[in-house]
Amino acid sequence: MSDIFCKRRIGLGTLRYILMSVAVISILLYAYTAHLPSGSWVSQVSVDKHGALGNWTVNDPVDYHPNNIIITTSVENISSSDKPVTGTLTDREADSESLDRGPDVCVGSNKRLREVEDLLCRVEQPRPKYDPDLKNPCWRESITMDTEGEPPDNTQLNFPSGRMRCLPYFHILCCSKSGTTDLYKRISLHPDIVPNSGIFGKEQLFWGWYFYGYLGKWERGRPKALEEYIDSFNTIATYLSSETVTTEQKTHLVTRNGRIPAGHVGVTRLAQAAQNRGLREPHVLTPHLMRHLYRDPKFIVLMRDPVERLYTAFLFHRMGDSPQSFHLAVKQAIAMFDVCLSQATSRRECYFNGSVTEHLPADIHFICYAVFLKEWLAVFPWKHFLFMRTEDYSKNVTSSLLEVFRFLDLPEPDNQTLERMKQLPIAHHTQQKDFAGDMLPETRAILTQYVQPCNAELADLMNDQKYTWKDSHSAPQTSQQQEY
């Protein structure tokens, strides 16, 4: 018995020693990998209204702590001189190439801990040297062999001068159930628009989901790297590298990325970005990351009446299945969100706080489009955006498509192609709403009153009163042709 007891004590002691050793080694490895290169410890940064990262100071690494990173941005006060005079876009802003991006505010990330890639640390791979002869943002990249001496999968793209790499020429901003898929289905018929390898040939879900390791609302995985996103656009890279493509075609062909959440899903993940860890509200947002990489991106912003969109999205995402469940969810969500707003020092602490927004029974925070659009307009000049209402797009599809093509600087398609675009059936019609019916009148009254200050703020930002959606409130939609 004593021998067995001694062996058991020896076994437990050995196990305890092994566990302690593993813990010490893990701590040392983390301390080693978490340290950044000398000179990259940033304590204070300012972001100007064009997204350029301005004044910054460098501290000794021993003084570093995530809470020391302070980035200020003037998103709350965009001056009237920066607004379009008539609600349409102007070209009086400086060209984006002439805007200083500012220094790279690198914090770093630890792949072993599955931390999100710090795109601002791409100092060894700065903004690519884009080919000026191409409309789509593409560049040549030198080819490196993998560990087995083989080139990457997509290096059929001109070995001598390096492989062609591309980013999308344009994006759609806003949110689900606003008609974004329908718009993409129609403009995809344009002969100069090349699909990507995403969902429906349009959505990569990179900036709002995969980049942060989200495969679904509650499903987590490995955060995707930027290189994986770029791989999704190998189709156009192949076209532009082909000897059969004419010079004229190269100056026209473009590819696209589907919906990027202007807020909503994307903002709930932003706390994981390197510059935002440990902060009460995120200070480096998706537009800052895109500004770091991009030449001249174009954004189509499709906005639907926020009251109608909220109800359709509620049913589509199966957060509830009836007007009654929606009514209860709205009342609870407003109460929860108002508690946060009453206790916060700024509204951004609530609108950009995933621990708050992910637990709302209805996405009440996203009815205030102006909060999120101001973040984008604080980084990119107005000329990068085309703003459209879903209701106007639905009423006159043809003129809306022509407006999109003019904005994208693409040739107008022939009448036959334009007619094919117009005749396509509505994409992603929400059948759940057909079964559930319209929201309760009392719910509509609550939401209409709640959203009024937000819509007024948006109308002021756009310098156009149509963004109050008073025409929708006075005549609620009844036609299936207006439903997505």
Image (cartoon, rainbow, N blue to C red):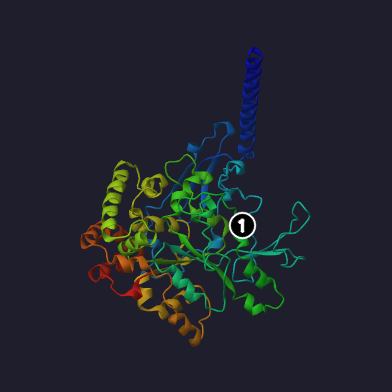
Amino acid at circle 1: Glu
Q: Residue at x 54, y 49 (%)?
A: 221
Is 134 or 95 nearer to us in this picture? 134
Residue 455, given in percent of the width and then of the height, sits at 30, 61
Classify residue 429 as left or right of residue 341. Answer: right
Q: Classify mark 1: helix, strand or loop.
A: helix
**Quadrant of the image for the N terminus?**
top right
Query: Does residue 270 show up?
Result: yes
Note whether residue 60 is visible: no
Residue 60 % position (x, y):
58, 33
- Judged left or right of residue 149, residue 186 is left
Q: Which residue is mark 1?
A: 228
Residue 6 picture quarter: top right
Task: Residue 195: give x, y in percent of width and height.
Answer: 57, 71
Give the residue drawn at x 26%, y 56%: 327
Task: For the C terminus, give its image quadrant.
Answer: bottom left
- Residue shown at the point (62%, 50%) measured from the top left: 122
Looking at the picture, does residue 164 appear above or below residue 347?
below
Work out whether 165 lies above or below 359: below
Which of 133 and 216 lies nearest the eye of the viewer? 216
- Residues 217 and 191: in front is 217
Could you say where residue 173 lies in the image, as x and y percent from the top left?
A: 45, 63
In the rendered image, the vertical position of residue 422 relative to residue 51, given as above or below: below
